[in-house]
Amino acid sequence: MPLVFTLAFRNLFHDRLRLVATVIGIVFSIVLVTVQMGLYLGFGQMVTTMIDHASADLWIMPRGTKCFEDPSLLDTRIRGRALAVNGVADAIPVVIGFADWRMPSGASTPVFVVGSDLRAGGLQPWDVVDGRVESLSTPNAVAVDKSYLSRLGIAGMGARAEIRQQTVRVAALTDGIRSFTTTPYVFMDVDRARAHTGVPSGKATYFLVHVASGATIDGVQHNLRENLSDVEVLTTAEFADRSRSFWLFGTGAGAALFAGALLGVIVGTVIVAQTLYSSTKDHINEFATLRAIGSSRNYIYKVIICQALLNAVIGFGIADLIGSAVVYLTASSALPIVITPALTMALFVLTVVMCVVSAIAAIMKVTRIDPAMVFTR
Amino acid sequence: MNDSVLETVGVAKVLGSGAGQVHALKGVNLSLRGGELTLLMGPSGSGKTTLLSILGCMLAPTEGTVRVRGESIEGKGPEDLAKLRRDHVGFVFQSYHLFPTLSAADNVRLALDVRGENGREAKAKTASALAKVGLSQKKASYPRELSGGEQQRVAIARAVVGSPSVILADEPTAALDGENGKAIMTILADIAKAPDRGVLVVTHDPRLVSFADRIIHIEDGTIVREQSREGARTLKNILGGA
């Protein structure tokens, strides 16, 4: 084992109380950053879940649409014009809107209706655990997520309720289609969705465009933009980005999450810097001895940075375990915390950078060491 | 006579400024020769520590020249001086300055590690240095497990492991009893037999005179008397030394 590492390791473990305090500081900081960034990613995924699960190459939407939940309307004649554009295989109408769900008990709760042409695909419920998507074509059939059953005041499959004084019947149950707005999604056929949301029969919220084989998405997007006025044509990725931007930055939610993460980094840096500085101060005689016997400054910096890196590895290891537990515990919540391998890697790099930056104060201290002090102590 | 391994010419040092200014050294000329153990003696405040710091390339003189193995330290920066120390100077301190969290062997190996020497050869040199001071059996012991005399022997092993040209020892026996002090001086005297290595021991202790080849007396920042090997022997006889 390199002696620099041995010295750093022993310096660190020599004062276990201080080591524990340092590690707690790092763990607190990194868990805070993990939760904030995990919420950011989870929120980012939740707000685009409908867009990501729709079978669309391109989305036609009213100009100025900010996000999927924006209930502006298009004229259905646009569909015919879109189908006439070279490279368009299909343009499937989607209708969305808020509605009032009246439970069998007489109480009511708001729901978010998602209607699509079920024969052509489009935006259908996924992760169906009871019933079949095809059964949504039968009269009054709807699909809801099983996690919302109690919220909707129903028992499960076959249960009946009312939307706009019209009866609906649960014909399929999904698992895990949660809404970040906490308003339950209710899937149904597009015509029934119009009836339940009050959208006129000649209107739709989106048209999901399927590109014909042999045509490129970019090319068809260009053609549609050339031929359709007063609408926007976005790829799925572009619409997801726009939705994410709106919810995360248009509402300030993302800024709040980043501010929390930044606070975590600052707190962690200060704690590690303080403990590394006091550790260096306690070992100042040893660093002066090193200098006296001819060590270069770089050698001493290596010892201190090695201490900082050891702190980082220990702290990150524990924080990662806690983060994994948090991910597991929030997996089925309305806003799950999502940690991707890339985020884990980024957090590790952040921890290392935080700890190395924290070593600056300690390094400045040893830079000023007078080796001659060994004769007077 | 052997070549000079370390010399000062007209070295002066002023410490502090203004009304608090102190002329710690006033034109010190000194030469340490290989194969000699030299004692530097003088009362407290005479400038011994300041001179030792300058000889050890830790402090720059206000005036005068210091040469280590013929190389002047004039104009050298802190990193160049550190290189001179690790290449040419070994230190033995009054309070040992061992690393409490490292074993005896690692304390010694540290002096090689800072020179970029590691691996098997460094371990062999470390074992040899510990054997030279009679501590082969205690290489895995930590400083807290060693007596004062043993700790100082580890410090001596650390000082010699890199085969420096000069060993500078600051009151190496001050914290030890007579028997341990004698053992330490015997080791240092033995080390000083190498013709290319000089040993300078700063001390108050007149009992150490018996080990000296030369004694330099410093008072008030000036070398007031220098006794040759013969003079030292006469003094040894007067004091009843070995």
Image: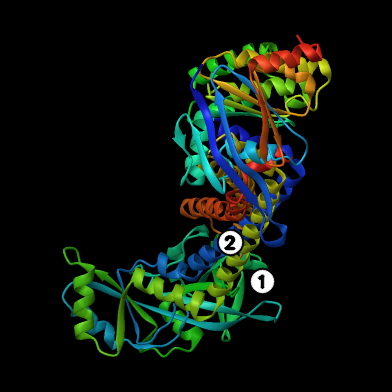
Q: Name the residue under label 1.
A: A151
x, y percent for residue B222: 66, 39
The kind of secondary structure element at disc 2 is: loop
Q: Write down the quadrant of residue A176 in the picture.
A: bottom right
How many residues crowd mark 2 within 10 Å: few (<14), some (14–19), many (20+)?
Answer: many
Spot occupied by residue A318 in the image (x, y as percentages of width and height): 64, 46
Indicate the position of residue B197 as horizontal and vertical percent values.
54, 20
Say which mark, if any, is on residue A336: 2
Q: Residue at x 52, y 15 (%)?
A: B195
Mark 2, mark 1: which one is toward the viewer?
2
Q: Give x and y (percent) for residue A274.
A: 68, 55
Identified by mark 1, the residue type is: Arg
**Are dots 2 and 1 on a single chain?**
yes
Label 2–label 1 contact, CB within 8 A: no
Q: How far is disc 2 from disc 1 in space, using C-alphas?
A: 19 Å
Q: Chain ID for label 2?
A: A
